[in-house]
Amino acid sequence: MKRSVRNKIYDKVFEIIGYTATFFGLIILLYFITDIVYEGWNRIDYDFLTSYTSRKAEKSGIFPAWVGSVWILALTLIISVPIGIASGIYFEEYAKKNKITYMLEVNIANLAGVPSIIYGLLGLEIFGRMFGFGSSILTGSLTLALLILPIIIVSTREALKAVPQSLRDASFALGASKWQTIWLQILPSSMGGVLTGTILALSRAVGETAPLIVIGALAYVPFIPSSPMDEFTVLPMQIFEWTSRPQHEFLINAAAAIIVLLCITFLMNGIAIYLRNKWQKKNQW
Amino acid sequence: MKEKKEQRTIIQSESINVYYDDKHVLKNVNLDIKEKTVTALIGPSGCGKSTYLRLINRMNDYIPEFHFSGTIVVNGKNIYDDSVEVEELRKDIGMVFQKPNPFPKSIYDNVAYGLKIQGIKNKTVLDEAVESSLKQAALWDEVKDNLKAGGLSLSGGQQQRLCIARALAVQPTILLMDEPTSALDPISSAKIEELIFELKKQYTIIIVTHNMQQATRVSDNTAFFYIGDLIEYGKTDELFMNPIHEQTKKYITGRFG
Ligand SMILES: Nc1ncnc2c1ncn2[C@@H]1O[C@H](COP(=O)(O)OP(=O)(O)OP(=O)(O)O)[C@@H](O)[C@H]1O
Ligand SMILES: [Mg+2]
């Protein structure tokens, strides 16, 4: 067989495998989403969003859960984003290329792969017990911040790396200091990538359950948290709790809560994509 | 070439050695450059032209493998002295790169950048600097109605002139150009060459080029480098007409390089 013909067949086969793989993933995702929307859509109304949980499924709502999620999200953001971006900048722009830096880099990359429940144990021990923050929003946020820090650091570094050397050269050659170059050229040019990574990391934090269970987040919260020291629940915890009930009505509640949670994640990912496109258009080299 | 009044030496390089780790890239180079002249640096690829150029505004400092010994005195100051602030040095020594590299900002902001980072905020000062720099770079007429447009929306040749304007805005005395026309079409290149001719009245220019015609057209003096050695340095006319060294002769007649 001629080589060109053989290559064409390989091309075709690979294309088909690629399509199948993509469709397989999509179809499964679609199946889940349709199933959940079918189950839960009609359950979502104003009352559902503004009620506390109750022993009766029809009267239960996700008010404390979504407020808790917002609290957790906001606080996690405030804690993790400045530290994550600053560390990313440090590693990419300032750190000397030596053994210690290398060790730190490898470990940060490894941390991104540590199971989240381990972070929960760490958070429980350090923030919950040692610092005495208990099962509060603060403990939860600090724990989740630790969990997503590696992702923010790594994606910040990737974004900074993508800034061409020529831009740095141009700035330095005009007498700009390193700090000015980073602040006025490199960061604005890489902001799209930095924000995308950050938002994706945060949307992972919104969906986390295991570490929050470990630090002792409650399943039943009859109040709206009003300070970071309050106890709390979050949407995924609420969903988890409802799905463990035998009654079908609670499963419907869970489906409805999942829809709300999915909407939040999709919204965040949408913002990430929007920002990426917007910044990419602005910075074409 | 008309003889100017006795020109001052503005850059003195003495016993310069540069290593990238173990690689000896510049070997005991001595090179003095006179004020308000154009000096062309020529030589085969990898002979150290860019390295020499980037010594003068200390742009090699960012390369971890870079090691330097020797002295370079610019305007009477040893620029590798510990007391020298590179940021200050670079305000006096502008640089134009091989590939046009405007910032992803407006034309105005590109030109004003060098002044803004010095803390100059006065709008009229900035406006005037932007206008006069763009005029000096022969770009004003083409962009004056559209200073808000992105620097990257210009053509390659215009971008390079924008980069020149940007360098001029901080009022340097020396302008370093590393193959400034190699990425440009012949017409844009010719414009830049004309510009160099104009700028020479006011600035000392060092230009790296692979184009022999360009070297003869724009420069007063030429330095020929070969694998890290400064082989020959002298008046451009003389060097091209009667090269002393065999290597120079071979190179300028295109027999190697
Ligand atoms: N960062 C670096 N690390 C190691 N070696 C380098 C580095 N930069 C340049 N060199 C080496 O130093 C030598 C001189 O490089 P330089 O860029 O000064 O050459 P050049 O004369 O400008 O060449 P060209 O005409 O191709 O631009 C080359 O052999 C090059 O491989
Ligand atoms: Mg070069």
Image: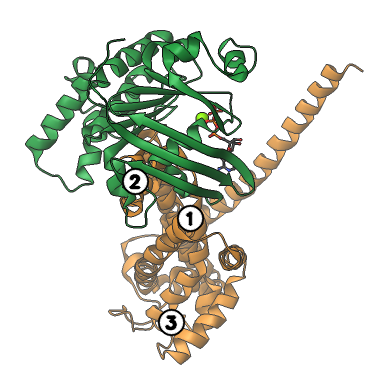
* Residues at marks 2 and 3 touching, judged by CB atoms closer than 8 Å: no
What colour is chain A? orange
Tag 3, which chain? A
> At x 69% / y 35%, what residue is drawn?
A19
- Amino acid carrying label 1: it is Glu
* Residues at marks 3 and 1 touching, judged by CB atoms closer than 8 Å: no
Chain rendered green: B
Q: Secondary structure at mark 1?
A: helix
Tell whether B106 sits left or right of B189.
Answer: left
> At x 27% / y 10%, what residue is drawn?
B2
| Position of B3 relative to A123 (above/below) | above
Tag 2, which chain? A
- Answer few, some or many: residues within 10 Å of disc 3's Cα (few below 14, many 20 plus, some between 14 and 19): some
- Amino acid carrying label 3: it is Tyr
| Quarter occupied by the C terminus of chain A | top left
Q: Which residue is mark 2?
A: A188
| Position of A15 relative to B211 (above/below) | below
Measure the C-alpha gap from mark 2 to mark 3.
Answer: 44 Å
